[in-house]
Amino acid sequence: MLATVSVYIADDHPVFREGLTRAVHHHPDFQLVGEAGDGAVALEEIRALAPRVALLDVSMPKLDGVEVLGAIIREELPTAVVLLSAHLSAHVIFRSMLGGASGYLTKGADRDAILDALAAAARGEVQMPADVQTELVSELRRHATSNRPRLTSREFEVLRMVADGLTTPQIADQLVLGTATIKSHLQSLYDKLGVSDRASAVAVAMRQGILQ
């Protein structure tokens, strides 16, 4: 059983923040230690109060929730951060989780889900609802795809034939091209994949999902 968890809440919508503070007050394992309506005040008070968990609105004046999170991580403060947002943004979710957030929920989440995320953060766990996970996976895939080297259709053909075990003359015959041209395509492939031989080219291409 966890000891009482100190919680700090920052949200610039007073009515919404009041609902959150009331929910934390009524939770037997939580103690509300402070609240704020802007990120700059929140960061100063988090530094002073060192709460176990901070629930931060992504969109706040002066400093937004992601900026406060960044400062907490940089300064190695002992506070886990759960972020709340009015909208699902794959880019912001990606930035937040990469930046060290312990949870991310929309403001449409029910109070129990938010309290569960705070409890999970206090235990050192990361919690996200299914819709947030979907957006995060989508953004991860986009980044993975954007980081792949861009091969021309001819380079891809040559790579596929290399993976099938064909020699340079055999590839030249199949594509009705000269061996010098195939060697040029191979060198371009090596440069793009950061390798120097055929086996490494195939291995890297499979690892990056270029070849299945």
Image (cartoon, rainbow, N blue to C red):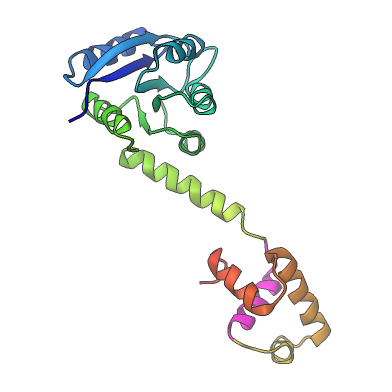
| Image point (63%, 83%), residue name | 161
Left or right, residue 65 beside residue 114:
right
Please state, as top left, top right, bottom left or bottom right, where the N terminus lies in the image.
top left
Magenta stretch, main secondary structure class: helix
Front position in the image: 192 or 126: 126
**How many numbered circles does the render carry?**
0
Left or right: residue 176 compared with residue 41: right
Q: Position of residue 151 (x, y in %)?
A: 68, 65
**Residue 189 position by quadrant:** bottom right
Which residue is located at x 77 percent, y 81 percent? 182
Q: Which residues are magenta?
A: 150-164
Left or right side of 137 for 108: left
Asked if the stretch drawn in magenta spans residue 163, the answer is: yes
Residue 62 percent across, percent down from the top left: 55, 12
> Residue 28, image x and y in percent?
16, 19
Residue 48 part of the magenta-drawn span? no
Give 75 or 162, whichever is nearer the viewer: 75
